[in-house]
């Protein structure tokens, strides 16, 4: 028995060495994502492995949650080193430092990076605008109109937190405040503005800031609203897609998949395979929203009940609605003087070639 066990161990060791040797010969890509259910398609592909196969492709774990082989028709074609990132702005920074090949992040963060001439392109949409506004339990508001009334009646500025200055939620919130005639500032010393916007520097700080009364409300992507409510930290008063102006945000893009131009030039087939796998995984999420929601919530350590309430919708092509939404972001950010470089005063039509490389979706 001892001899048999030794032989089994020896065989397993040889197989492990073989796999390691094969992996060493494969191209390696660093793929970054954020601990948010907006990135569930990648989590699903990592978590389900061969059970989630798209056009013969799947992700085979080498080190779960850290390192995977990208499989295609039964053969490994690349090693994917997975990087967990705090925010979209950090994603852009890692792209600039050549520490990332492919990244999932908010479209506005990627736009901000491209404006600063970071050589990256949006290679696929990912998810439409999600998330919402949650107010502290001390704020007597259950709806967006009630919150606006509270702001207007307040004798001092109302503090609203957000996780990243280039994120979709804060861009949508600023536009909504403008449409309501609410003045706002990022300067905490400005007591004349009705709202002070507070950069909480990362998703992990949203609920603590709300619970500790550091802010009166927080705007953030899924699963923040469901998590905050589930923990008793506040009241979810509106989804982002329902904020004013009416119907403006219904089909707006949120997160996208971006890639470094150098990676696109060196490994176009691998970028295409990854994009197609994510598109298929996103479609699977759309077809079984509850199961996908539970998987995404579990992946980042949230209760199953939060996942069941997911409102996410994933997109598999650059639709006209998506382009209109991207144009809206450009318009809002340029009005605010946010862009100083490649995207300054440009519409989406003018900037499409700078922003998007559409070749990886359906061969278009």
Image (tube, grey):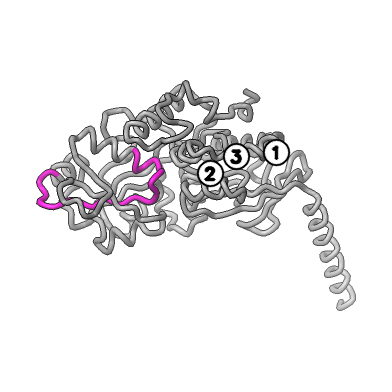
Residue bearing the label numbered 1: 270
Residue bearing the label numbered 3: 259
Residue 148 as seen in the image, left or right of residue 43: left
Of 96 and 69, nearer the camera is 96
Magenta residues span: 152-171
Residue drawn at the location 49% of the way across and 56% of the way down = 300
SS type, badge 1:
helix
Residue 354 as seen in the image, left or right of residue 132: right
Residue bearing the label numbered 2: 104
The quarter of the picture where residue 257 lies is top right
Residue 21 as seen in the image, left or right of residue 82: right
State which quarter of the image contains the N terminus: bottom right
Instruction: Answer whether residue 358 is visible to the viewer in this image.
Output: yes
Q: Give the percent coordinates (x, y) of residue 16.
A: 80, 61
Q: Give the percent coordinates (x, y) of residue 190.
A: 19, 51
Residue 167 falls within the magenta-colored stretch: yes
Of 235 and 4, nearer the camera is 235
Alpha-carbon distance for marks 1 and 2? 16 Å
Q: Give the percent coordinates (x, y) of residue 42.
A: 57, 46
For marks 2 and 3, the one nearer the N-term is 2
Q: Residues within 10 Å of mark 2 (few under 14, many from 20)?
A: many
Residue 327 as seen in the image, left or right of residue 335: right
């Amino acid at each position: 028995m001892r001899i048999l066990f030794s032989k089994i161990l020896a065989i397993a060791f040889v197989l492990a060495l073989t796999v390691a040797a094969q992996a060493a010969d494969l191209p390696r890509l660093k793929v970054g994502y954020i601990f948010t259910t907006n990135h569930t398609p990648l989590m699903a592909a990592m978590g389900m492995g061969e059970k989630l196969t798209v056009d013969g492709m799947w992700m085979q774990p080498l080190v779960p949650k850290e390192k995977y082989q990208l499989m295609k028709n039964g053969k490994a074609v690349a090693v994917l080193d997975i990087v967990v990132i705090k925010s979209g702005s950090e994603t852009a920074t890692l792209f600039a430092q050549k520490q990332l090949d492919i990244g999932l992040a908010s479209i506005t963060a990627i736009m901000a990076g491209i404006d600063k001439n970071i050589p990256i392109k949006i290679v696929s949409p990912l998810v439409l605008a999600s998330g919402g506004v949650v107010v502290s339990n001390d704020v007597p508001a259950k709806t967006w109109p009630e919150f606006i009334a509270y702001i207007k009646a307040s004798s001092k500025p109302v503090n609203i937190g957000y996780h990243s200055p280039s994120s979709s939620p804060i861009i949508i919130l600023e536009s909504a405040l403008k449409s309501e005639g609410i003045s706002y500032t990022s300067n905490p010393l400005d007591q004349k503005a009705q709202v002070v916007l507070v950069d909480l520097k990362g998703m992990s700080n949203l609920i603590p800031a709300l619970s500790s009364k550091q802010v009166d409300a927080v705007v953030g992507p899924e699963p923040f609203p469901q998590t905050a409510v589930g923990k008793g930290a506040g009241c979810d008063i509106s989804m982002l897609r329902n904020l004013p102006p009416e119907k403006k945000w219904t089909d707006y893009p949120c997160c996208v998949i971006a890639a470094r131009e150098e990676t696109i030039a060196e490994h176009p087939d691998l970028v295409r395979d990854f994009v197609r796998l994510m598109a298929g995984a996103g479609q699977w999420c759309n077809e079984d929203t509850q199961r996908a929601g539970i998987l995404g919530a579990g992946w980042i350590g949230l209760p199953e009940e939060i996942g069941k309430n997911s409102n996410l919708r994933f997109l598999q092509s650059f639709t006209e609605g998506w382009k209109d939404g991207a144009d809206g972001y450009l318009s809002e950010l340029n009005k605010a003087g946010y862009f100083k470089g490649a995207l300054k005063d440009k519409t989406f039509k003018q900037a499409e070639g700078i922003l998007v490389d559409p070749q990886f979706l359906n061969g278009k």
